[in-house]
Every structure is written in C-alpha cells, then in structure tokens.
C-alpha cells in the first residue's frame, strides 16, 4: 500500500476511535489516536494476518501492552475486516465483545488479553520464545506506552528478550510524552528510552515522527532486517493526533468526547479527507 | 510413621517433569533462578533446550508463561509459592487467569515447613489468593504418589493450575494403585465421630492423629482434599452429615484456605460446628521444619490435640 492509502485508512481508524469512545461515554482516545498510524501500518502493511482465520497458528502476533488503547486496536481490526465497523458502537457496553481492555477470548484478532500495564510485553516475549523454540517463522509485535514502561515488569521482560536475542520480537514504544498525571517529566520519566532499551541489548530505531508512514516503514523494515537482537522502535508521536482540541492535551488521556466535541472531531477528520 | 519412605513433593514434581519430557516435547519449563530448589533443575539437566530460566523476575515469568500458552503449547512455571502467588498475584490473575490460559504454576516451598528461611519465605496465604481467581484449579498433593499424578493431570488440564508443593520430605502414604482425580476428595480413613479434612502434608498429620485418637475411642473420618478448588463439596457435606463435626487441617493460614473453602461449602450445604486448624493469622519464623510443625500444632500430636479439644 502507498503511504496515501495507509493515511486514508488511519483516518477511518481515528473515526472509529471517536465513534467507540463517544458511544461508550468513556475510554482512552488520546493514546489510541497517537498510535493510529502504528496500528494501521502493522495491520495493513507489516503483519501477516487473516481476518477469516484469526487464530491461524502461523499468523504474526500483536500484543497491545498499553491495553487501554483498545479503541485504537478495535477500530483497526474492524477496518481490517475482523468484525463489522458497526460493532465499535458497542464499545464498553454490557455484553459487548469489545471490552474496555482487550480480551483475547471475546474479540476476533486479539492475540492476548491486556490492560494491566507492563504485562503485555511479557506475554509477547513468551510468544517469541515459543516461536523460536518450535521453529515457527511468525513475528511478534508489542505496543507499549511511554508511561507504561515505568512498570518494572517491562524491564524484566526486556532483559529476557535481549538475553535471548529474540530477533522475532519488535517492541514499539508510543512516545507521546503524556501520561495521566502530566508529562513524563512531571511524573517519573523513563527517558532516555532509547538508551535504556539499548542497554537491555535491543536494536533501537528512533522514529522522529511516529505519525508518518514513510518513517514507520523504514523503522519496521530495519526491525525485520535485524538479526540477533530484538528491536525497539521508539516512535515520537502526538497524543490525541488528528483532533485539534485533543492534541497534546493531557486531559484527553481517558475521557470521551461529548456530542458536540464528537461532531467537531468527526468534521475535522472529514475535512482532512 | 518413622519407617515410612519420605519424599518432598517438590522432588516428585521435578522427577515427574523429566518423565513427562520423555513422552512429550510440546511443553517448556520455566523457572526464576530457583531450579535447584524447585527441582526443575532435573528437567533442565535432561532437556536443557526446553528449559528457560527467566531469572529473578517472577512477574515476567508468569507473563512469559502466559504468552507461551497462547501459542497452544504447554508450559510449567516454577518458583517459590511466596513469589508465584504473592509477588506475581496480579500477573497470574490478569495474564493467566483472565484469558484462562493453560499454565501450570509449580509453586514449591509452600507453608511453614519451609523451615529455617523463616517468615519471609513461608507462604501461608497462597491457597487463599489462588482460589479467588475464577477458573483456577488449586491442587495440594499430600505425597509423592499424588504429586506425580497431579503433575500429569495438570499437564492434561485445559486451564490454569496451581500446584502447591512442599520443601519438606513427606511420608509416602499412597500405593502404586492409588487413583487421583482432580476435584475428587479421597476418604483415606472412614470414621463416625468427626470428619478431619486435610490437604497436602497435613494429610499425614491427620492420619497420624486419627491413629492416636482411635486408641482413645475417637473414630475420625479422614478426608484428603488434594484439590482445594474446585472443592469436592459433595464429599465434605456427605461426611459432615454423617459425623456432625468437621476439623480442617492445612499448613496455611486459617483464613481463606482449605478451612475457608470447607466452611463456605458447609454453610450452604450442611451447617455443622467446624474447627479450623492451621497457622492462626500470624507470620511464621525460622527453625527446623519438623520443630515448627510441632510448635504450630500441625504435627500428628498437635492435630490430635485440636480434635480432642474440639470434641470436648
């Protein structure tokens, strides 16, 4: 796909994020929007997955370690055809298969249940170890938040991944520089993120604009080409990206747009198209 | 029971993993720098390429096990009970329990019989913690025969299993023909005056107590509740209806473990007086395991005295 085609899909993913969180009257639009290009690139360009056979044993795996950004994952899976786009309106509703945080047993295309921060990356490491051990060629991707990586378990997982030279593992850090209580620096910053992952024996690729498909393409190609070490892509993104009043606003981490805000946000995305 | 053969259930665990490994190559064994103590080192020696040492990082250990389980392969994750059920509780709950993944947690060094290491390493809370997780099976083998059978049953299970294993050599009370089934308690000794429900190492103590009490004319029914979850509530209720009094015995806090599970079942099914024997809401301490069991009233003599005072 061309970058323009991917950008078009990312816009639809953004709309899906807004539709879901608006319908749920809750959820996490900020970090879902910052990762819209990452989600889109993974599911439409990078990963080998089959929406008609979501449990295909040979598929590439994706673990949303920052599980609260489920609206972004769901919107992407819907666009990719794992379930109808209309389902996004059931997000967080009683009885919906779109739980507030991803449940692998409820939702087609979800490879691991996540939501409690720091845990998804460990599961991804386990998947990568299993793939290596049984000689399966699939790759494993895990998306972490830059706040999430304050969790100690992330570094336990990184240590094991580096020591086992899991070059079938690619960790992406969505570095949007905001967490619930403020900027990373205002809370307890994990910076320098790239240096830390390097110290844990990762191949590190920094992406200056993680909302740019051209730059993401280069980074994922570099990850795929790397042998003998897992890769960490540190993607500098904008939290709330694509919706003017949400961009770089800490308050939009875990808040849904009201009717008026929803209409404005959707109109902005339409105009962009 | 001085002349009885004694084997720690952790050793049974390690040896049976090796035996399983000879038959199946579809599982990995993980540990957290305790392979010598948990006895997974035996498996590591036999099948080094099927063993992953996750280092001293139990939260990640559980997450990695979960990830392996998602791929359809089986996995045993081992460390001490304190770190498996305690430190990594939330990983076990959210990464293993919530997705109902088939991970076998081989938790050794449970209870006060850890001995000299003392209170920080004597996990008397793990049964309580693990049985609150929906879909978790909790098995506490009483001896070598049962532990080996439990390892095999856990391998064949289809969801998470917590195997609670001990450090101290336990009397071997079962013969080769012993039949083990997860969720089915075993009447080790029929009796009519009082039901003694025990789990793990305490089954031996209960049987020893029953012998002593028989000489005094007290006829104990001893139930081996190797599976604390799902509890064999039918057996508990049936026995309680017969004897009218129940004593629970566990090397665990009296809060939330076997005693709690039995009381919950009896309250709904057959309310009778119950005496819970176990660690009474205190931390343990250092000392030789056998001496600690005696001090905390968990050896045969201690259990007998608890039953006696309960019936008085």
Image (tube, coloured by chain):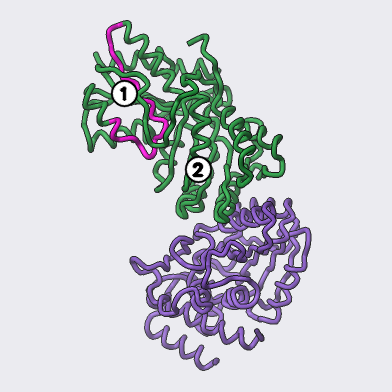
Chain colours: A purple, B green
Q: What residue sits right under mark 1 in the picture? A: B247
Q: Which of marks 1 and 2 is nearer the N terminus?
A: 2
Vertical arrangement, residue A265 with respect to residue A231, above or below: below
Label 1 resides on the chain identified as B
Q: Does the magenta stretch include residue B225?
A: yes
Q: Quadrant of the N terminus of chain A?
A: bottom right
**What residue is rendered at 43% in x and 72% in y?**
A255
Rendered location of residue B294, percent (x, y): 45, 15
Residue A187 visible in the picture: no
**What residue is rendered at 27% in x and 19% in y?**
B194
Q: Nearer the viewer, residue A225 or A244?
A: A225
Q: What residue sits right under mark 2 in the picture? A: B156
> Does residue B54 appear to the left or right of B130 in the view shown?
right
> Does residue B133 appear to the left or right of A215 in the view shown?
left
User: How far is the residue under mark 1 from the one under mark 2?
Assistant: 32 Å
Q: What stretch is highlighted in magenta?
A: B216-236
**What residue is rendered at 38% in x and 29% in y?**
B225
Badge 1 density bin: few <14, some 14–19, many ≥20, Cα 10 Å? many
Q: What element carries label 2?
A: helix
Label 1 or label 2, whichever lies nearer to me, is 2
Q: Which residue lies furthest to the top in this view?
A: B215
Query: Share a chain, discs 1 and 2?
Result: yes
Q: What element carries label 1?
A: strand
Residue A159 visible in the picture: yes
Vertical arrangement, residue A58 with respect to residue B120, above or below: below
């Amino acid at each position: 796909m061309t970058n323009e085609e991917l950008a078009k899909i990312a816009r639809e993913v953004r709309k899906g994020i807004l539709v879901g969180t608006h319908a749920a009257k809750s959820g996490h639009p900020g970090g879902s929007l910052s990762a819209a290009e990452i989600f889109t690139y993974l599911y439409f360009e990078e990963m080998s997955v089959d929406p008609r056979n979501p449990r295909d044993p040979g598929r590439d795996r994706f673990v949303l370690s920052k599980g609260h950004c489920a609206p972004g994952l769901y919107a992407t899976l819907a666009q990719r055809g794992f379930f109808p786009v209309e389902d996004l309106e059931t997000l967080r509703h009683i009885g919906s298969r779109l739980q507030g945080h991803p449940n692998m047993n409820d939702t087609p295309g979800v490879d691991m249940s996540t939501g409690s921060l720091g845990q998804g990356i460990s599961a991804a490491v386990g998947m990568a170890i299993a793939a290596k051990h049984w000689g399966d060629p699939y790759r494993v991707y895990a998306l972490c938040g830059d706040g999430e990586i304050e969790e100690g378990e992330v570094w336990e997982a990184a240590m094991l991944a580096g020591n086992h030279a899991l070059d079938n593992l690619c960790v992406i850090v969505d570095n949007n520089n905001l967490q619930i209580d403020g900027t990373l620096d205002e809370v307890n910053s994990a910076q320098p993120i790239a240096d830390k992952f390097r110290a844990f024996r990762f191949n590190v690729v920094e992406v200056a604009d993680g909302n740019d498909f051209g730059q993401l393409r280069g980074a994922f190609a570099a990850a795929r080409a790397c042998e003998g070490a897992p890769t960490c892509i540190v993607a500098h993104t904008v939290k709330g990206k694509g919706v003017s009043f949400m961009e770089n606003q800490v308050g939009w981490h875990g808040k849904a747009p009201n009717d008026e805000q929803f209409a404005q946000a959707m109109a902005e995305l339409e105009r962009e198209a | 029971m001085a002349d009885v053969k004694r084997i720690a259930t952790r050793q049974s665990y390690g040896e049976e993993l090796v035996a399983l490994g000879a038959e199946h190559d579809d599982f990995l064994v993980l540990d957290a720098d305790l392979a010598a103590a948990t006895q997974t080192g035996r498996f590591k020696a036999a099948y080094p390429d099927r063993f992953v040492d996750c280092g001293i990082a139990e939260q990640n250990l559980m997450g990695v096990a979960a990830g392996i389980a998602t791929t359809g392969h089986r996995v045993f994750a081992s460390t001490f009970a304190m770190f498996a059920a305690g430190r990594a509780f939330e990983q076990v709950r959210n990464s293993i329990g919530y997705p109902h993944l088939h991970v076998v947690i081989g938790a050794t060094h449970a209870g006060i019989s850890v001995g000299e290491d003392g209170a920080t390493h004597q996990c008397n809370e793990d049964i309580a913690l693990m049985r609150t997780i929906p879909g978790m099976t909790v098995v506490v083998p009483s001896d070598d025969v049962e532990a080996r059978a439990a390892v095999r049953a856990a391998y064949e299970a289809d969801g998470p299993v917590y195997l609670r294993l001990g450090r101290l050599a336990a009397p071997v009370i079962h013969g080769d023909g012993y039949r083990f089934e997860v969720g089915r308690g075993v009447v080790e000794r029929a009796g009519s005056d009082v039901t003694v429900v025990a789990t793990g190492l305490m089954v031996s103590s209960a049987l020893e107590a029953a012998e002593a009490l028989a000489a005094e004319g007290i006829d104990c029914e001893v139930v081996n509740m190797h599976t604390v979850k799902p509890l064999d509530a039918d057996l508990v209720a049936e026995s309680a209806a017969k004897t009218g009094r129940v004593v629970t015995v566990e090397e665990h806090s009296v809060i939330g473990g076997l005693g709690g599970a039995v009381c919950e079942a009896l309250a709904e099914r057959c309310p009778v007086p119950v005496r819970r024997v176990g660690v009474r809401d205190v931390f343990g301490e250092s000392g030789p395991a056998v001496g600690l069991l005696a001090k905390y009233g968990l050896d045969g003599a201690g259990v007998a005295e608890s039953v006696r005072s309960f019936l008085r």
